[in-house]
Image (cartoon, rainbow, N blue to C red):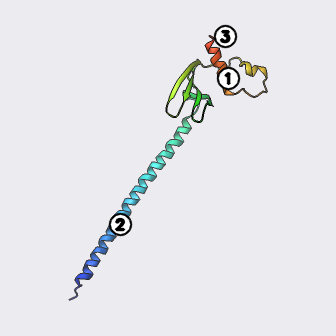
Amino acid sequence: MNTVPPATASSLGTGADSLSGLAVLGKTALALALVIGLILLCSWLLRRLNTARLGRGQPLRIVGSQLLGPRERVVVVEVRDTWLVLGVTPTQISRLHELPAPAEDATPTPHAAQAPDAPAPPFATRLADALRQNLSGGRP
């Protein structure tokens, strides 16, 4: 009769246990990698689909922005037929002013009427003119 000494039998049992433990660990790592890959794939697809939809039908459009400090800025946003002047900081967004949006085929602004080939004035100048005009009741 072939009998295995007890010391050899116990070492064989622990080797089999460690192999089954490694197999379980490998399966768990593979499942985790699949879940992370699926999350990354869904994120990429969502980003691609959202950029495809950002077209003309969006009700929100950024007209312009101006940095005021290292982390503060003024942003003019068009929502339907209204321009909102927003103050943006790292912690909050505040509405500073509200203007009716000019018509697309409206008469040119005084800056554009001066020289058709000249570059557009800076955003700060246009914003100051618009605010001045709005505060004076529509008079230039």
Kind of residue indicated by mark 3: Arg
Mark 2 or mark 1: which comes first in sequence?
2
Q: Which residue is mark 2?
A: 23
Q: Look at 73% across and 27% down and name the residue there.
A: 120
Q: CA distance from mark 3 to mark 1?
A: 15 Å
- Give the residue type at disc 2: Ala
Question: Is residue 139 depicted above or below 63 in this figure?
Answer: above
Nearest to viewer (mark 3 / mark 2): 3
Mark 2 lies on a secondary structure that is: helix
Q: Nearer the viewer, residue 91 or 140?
A: 91
Q: What amino acid is found at the position of numbered circle 1 in the picture?
A: Arg
Q: Report the Cα–Cα distance between label 3 and label 2.
A: 80 Å
State the image coordinates of residue 26 (x, y, percent, origin top left).
38, 63
* Residue 104 appears in the figure: no
User: Could you say which is closer to the camera, residue 6 or residue 60?
Assistant: 6
Residue 63 rendering spot, x and y as whole percentages: 62, 27
Q: Return the residue at label 3.
A: 139
Q: Position of residue 49 (x, y in %)?
A: 52, 40
**Outermost residue toward the bottom?**
1
Label 2, label 1: how far apart the Cα atoms are: 68 Å
Disc 3 is placed on an element classified as loop
Per the rendering, the mark at residue 126 is: 1
